[in-house]
Amino acid sequence: MSRALAVFHGRFGRATVYQLNRPFNIHAHREGHLIFHVGGMPACIDVSNGHYDLTETSVVAVNPWEPHNFLPTDLDGGAIFFVLYVNAEWFAPDASRSDRLRFGRTQFRRTPALDKHIRRTAALVCGAPSLSSLDSELRRLIDICYDESWQQAEIARDPRAGGAVTDFRVRKCIKMMSESPGAEVELDAIARESGLSRPHFYRLFRVQTGVTPNLYLNTLIMEQALEALVASEAPIADIGFDLGFSSQSGFTRFFAANVGMAPTDYRRAAKVLRA
């Protein structure tokens, strides 16, 4: 089973160090996503329609709401990854567009200076940092990666994913999902309430958001689960029941398929850094 070595939640988002040896389901995040391989066997990741190697010589950057899934090569010992989930509001608080945090390309080279910075920041995360030291180090690292992704960009990224949702029916569907995200939510019922047939709903939702309704809902459920795990001491079973799962085992399977580890393991490693 994969495990969390260090997890910090803060205003910036999440800074994590994981040992991963199991594949994930296809999933997405509201945050921007930077993945750094820092030890063990190389692995792979699928991002949208591309397949990328995760090695110590490159960085993989995933834009908000881009579907992706992790594919390990070592199913025993796994590999060590330093992973950042970056809140767009922290990255560019004065920007008005919803796509303000977008990287120039999915994979780019790690220069020697960038590699040194990655390893220093990963060590800081594992060393139980203070809020001020971690926030400033993360700001520098994320800014460097953002700039590198655009300097090494060859073609423009797809502007659709993570962009503004313009169709009022899709906005209504998102509002209904967001009001009470849970495993018991019936997407067909949401489609009907928005005046859409099932096929039209699924097609229009993907065109507008870049992801399927199921993936979008799963993302909202995961956000609620992560918040409950680090911000409360509620039993795992209660968190799962509150999110619409009929059993703790069902919630654990869902969590592990999207995060790579059991919720108990994530909670054990997680800490919250308050401003």
Image (cartoon, rainbow, N blue to C red):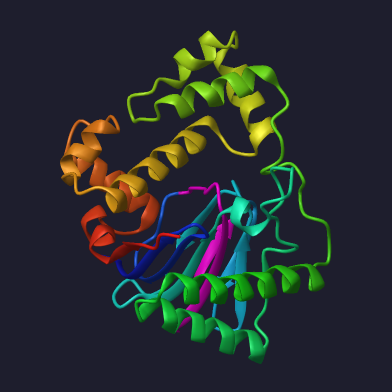
Provide residue 158's location: percent of width, then percent of height: 76, 49
The N terminus appears in which quarter of the rendering?
A: bottom left
- Give the residue drawn at x 72%, y 64%: 105
- Magenta stretch mostly in which secondary structure? strand
**Number of marks drawn:** 0
Task: Relative to 160, say whether 5 is above or below.
Answer: below
Horizontal side of 105 relative to 123 (left or right) equals right
Quarter of the view holding residue 124? bottom left
Residue 188 versus residue 28 in the image, above or below: above
Q: Is residue 200 visible?
A: yes
Q: Quadrant location of the C terminus?
A: bottom left
63 and 31: which is toward the camera: 31
Spot occupied by residue 224 in the image (x, y as percentages of width and height): 37, 41
Query: Residue 179's spot in the image, x, y percent?
Result: 44, 25
- Horizontal and vertical percent position of residue 141: 61, 75
> Residue at left 65%, top 52%?
49
Which residues, given as a range, are shown in magenta?
A: 26-47
Residue 41 in view here:
no
